[in-house]
Amino acid sequence: MNLRKPKWLRSKLPTSPSYKKVRQLVETNSLHTVCQSAQCPNMGECWSRGTATVMILGNICTRACSFCAIETGRPTGIDIGEPARVADAVAKMNLKHCVITSVARDDLQDGGAAVWASTIRAVRHRNPNTAIEILIPDFRGHIEPLDIVLEAQPDILNHNIETVKRLQRPVRKTAQYDRTLNLLKHSKEKGFVTKSGIMLGIGERKEEVKLTLDDLRSVGVSIITIGQYLQPTPEHRPIDRWVTPEEFLEWKKYGLSIGFEVVESGPLVRSSYHAEEQSEHFGISQGRESA
């Protein structure tokens, strides 16, 4: 296929003072962000709005998914000062909604769940009016570490299914389609607002996308993000097709028609795209401000 990006995928270079402020805060607090590590095309827009997705537990992942730009290898130990630094950065950015994610840490017995819980509690203690969204790994399907994270009371639980069932093994390697659905179902049954995301242009068929959206709704997912897959390097899985803005609009309409409360669907949409608006939709930010 023609690898030249279509015009709808071209993003503007970041130049605003807000962008520079967020970049300085990230560097000063020795934080990792998925914006940088995963080469997110929206980094300029989001940082200019004063938001960033903080990545905890280091920047080296124990998995080697064929779509992801994050470095794979053997991580170092745990940084016990990280939760406090994340909480401090959220305070300095004066965020109403923060998004926290992490690499997969299959080298740790609990998959990093204890650090997750400490970070959520630190952010909540320092920023009681801030809505907290977490984008978590699957903890290899174990419920115990998931419950450790949920007991820290995040506001939105996000775990991406990434692609259709047929492509799980070549795209996600270690992760599993049913495992993702079970994680989301368990979190929903615990009373949490749940969210997931899927990439298009990675080899899926339209009927498979429809089935995946149906499956996510069947386990109670309320928020879905749908975006274009972008190949990070020539060594990663190739792009299958450029999905048009018109098709993304069709998926948005379909998602809303089957019961998703929020559907972010577009070429540049990523997991954290306009995340602060989603907490406003569910009344989370307002509820915390009035608490």
Image (cartoon, grey):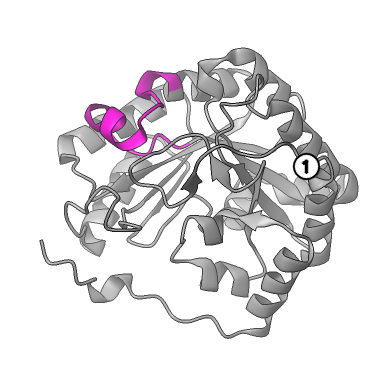
Name the residue nearer the viewer: 102 or 276: 102
Percent across and percent down for residue 90 are 78, 57
Q: Read off the residue under disc 1.
A: 79
- Looking at the figure, which quarter contains the N terminus? bottom left
Residue at figure coordinates x 82%, y 53% from the top left: 85
Query: Would residue 287 appear left or right of 274 to someone viewing this image?
Result: right
Question: Dot 1 surroundings within 10 Å: few (below 14), some, or many (20 or more)?
Answer: few
Q: Is residue 89 magenta?
A: no
Percent across and percent down for residue 153 are 75, 31
Residue at figure coordinates x 77%, y 29% from the top left: 152
- Asked which secondary structure carries label 1, the reply is loop
Name the residue nearer the viewer: 189 or 101: 101
Query: Would residue 123 appear left or right of 285 to someone viewing this image?
Result: right
Q: From which residue to which does the magenta span run?
A: 160-179
Number of marks in picture: 1
Name the residue nearer the viewer: 163 or 55: 55
Residue at figure coordinates x 40%, y 48% from the top left: 68
Q: Residue furthest left?
A: 1
Quadrant in the rendering for residue 255: top left
Callout 1, which amino acid? Asp
Percent across and percent down for residue 38 are 48, 55
Percent across and percent down for residue 7 are 26, 76
**Quick check: 273 above or below 191?**
below
- Looking at the figure, which quarter contains the C terminus? top right
The answer to whether residue 62 is seen in the rendering is: yes
The answer to whether residue 274 is seen in the rendering is: no
Residue at figure coordinates x 22%, y 72% from the top left: 6
